[in-house]
Amino acid sequence: MNEIYQLAEVERPAKPLHSLRQSFGTLMAKQVPLPVLQRLLGHADIKTTLRYIDVGENDKRDAIAQVFGGARPAVAATRQRESSKRS
């Protein structure tokens, strides 16, 4: 594990395996139902699984856009303001 961080020339986190589990949890949560992820991570309580998932502002915007279609709300609003300035 240390060799991988050295080759990548990035600072090794204090708990590298925990970081990998958190990255795995975050990526998987975007594709599979939480109960499936809970089983994959081996957690008895879903609250533990939720600690392994990071949700950022872009994730929230993308989720809204996926359900309601079109461009992400922030992107659409910015484009609309820019085009009205040009007119």
Image (cartoon, helix red, strand yellow):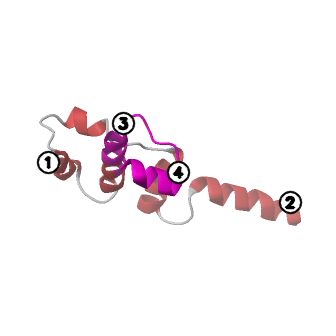
Measured Cα–Cα span from mark 2 to mark 4: 26 Å
Measured Cα–Cα span from mark 3 to mark 2: 49 Å
- State the SS at label 4: helix
Q: Which residue is mark 2?
A: 85
Percent x, y for residue 68? 46, 60
- State the SS at label 1: helix
Q: Residues within 10 Å of mark 3 (few under 14, many from 20)?
A: few
Say which of 87 and 73 sits in front. Answer: 73
Q: Is residue 87 left or right of residue 10?
A: right
- State the SS at label 3: loop
Q: Nearer the viewer, mark 1 or mark 4?
A: 1
Measured Cα–Cα span from mark 4 to mark 3: 26 Å
Q: Which residues are magenta?
A: 1-23
Q: Amino acid at mark 4?
A: Asn
Please say whether residue 6 is one of the residues in the magenta stretch. yes
Q: Nearer the viewer, mark 3 or mark 2?
A: 3
Q: Residues within 10 Å of mark 2 (few under 14, many from 20)?
A: few
Percent x, y for residue 1? 35, 50
